[in-house]
Amino acid sequence: MEGLIGKKVGMTQVFDADGKRTCVTVIEVGPCPVVQVKTLENDGYVAAQIGFGEQKVQRLTKAVAGHMKKTGGLEGAVRILKEFAPDAGEEVKVGDVLTVKNFEGVKYVSVTGVTKGRGFAGVLKRYNFAGGNMTHGGHSKRRTGGLAARDLPGWIEKGKKMPGHMGDVNRTIPNLEVVQVRPEDNAILVKGSIPGCRNGVVIVRKSLKNNAIAAKAKKGAK
């Protein structure tokens, strides 16, 4: 499967055989039951709709509840639904459960999540502006500075970096190195940080380009 749905557990560190420390993020991936299979004949494309997380039936809309009944035994069992393309030659059917074993042998992944919301922020925090002089008598310590020309154009141009809402947006961190895959814990450890807070839902996808390069290099080494 191209990717799976998971949950950010937190950050920790691991040590290799030489004692080198690596900071990693622990992601709980799956289990993800297959809710629906899209086919080229019926839907015009090939994909598998999978779920993640538990949900009470009374919180589902009638449309989603009816959709879940078709899975046979998974009614009200999932909270999030996403579609992923299957790998070449892979066949899945409704009711199959996908786990972190899907990433065994994968060297790089891309992780998508929602960043932490920071509320209303100024330009120093939002865009890392330098700010003005912090000395006594300075009048532009944390202000934006000049915004527009006095003459034409006599207005603020679209896209100008200004104070405003910060965070709470989708972000994808590509090509993160997979340090460990732990099927017994249903977790994957990736090098570095990922967007979002603890227990935040993330999408973990195989990084196709970097994995192909790694496989080619491994084949050439032999």
Image: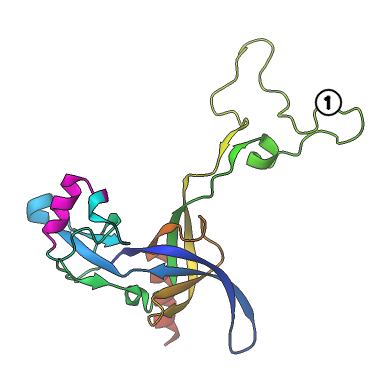
Question: Is residue 187 visible in this depiction of the protein?
Answer: yes
- Which residue occupies 54% across, 49% down? 116
Q: Is residue 29 left or right of residue 56?
A: right
Q: Is residue 139 left or right of residue 174?
A: right
* Closer to us: 88 or 193: 193
Q: Is residue 119 left or right of residue 67?
A: right
Quarter of the image with the C terminus is bottom left
Q: Amino acid at mark 1?
A: His
Query: Most extreme residue toward the left, as rendered?
Result: 41
* Closer to us: 151 or 124: 124
Tell me which secondary structure the magenta stretch mostly adopts: helix
- Which residue occupies 50% across, 44% down? 168
Q: Is residue 214 left or right of residue 10?
A: left
Highlighted magenta segment, given as a residue range: 59-71
Q: Quadrant of residue 213?
A: bottom left
Quarter of the image with the N terminus is bottom left
The residue at which mark 1 appears reads as 139
For residue 65: magenta? yes
- Which residue occupies 31% across, 70% down? 31
Task: Name the element at disc 1.
Answer: loop
Query: Most extreme residue toward the top, as rendered?
Result: 151
For residue 93: magenta? no
Please rate how many residues cluster around mark 1, counting C-alpha atoms within 10 Å: few if below 14, some from 14 to 19, many from 20.
few
**Residue 185 position within the rendered picture, expressed as x and y whole percent measured from the top left:** 41, 79
**Residue 182 position within the rendered picture, expressed as x and y whole percent measured from the top left:** 42, 80
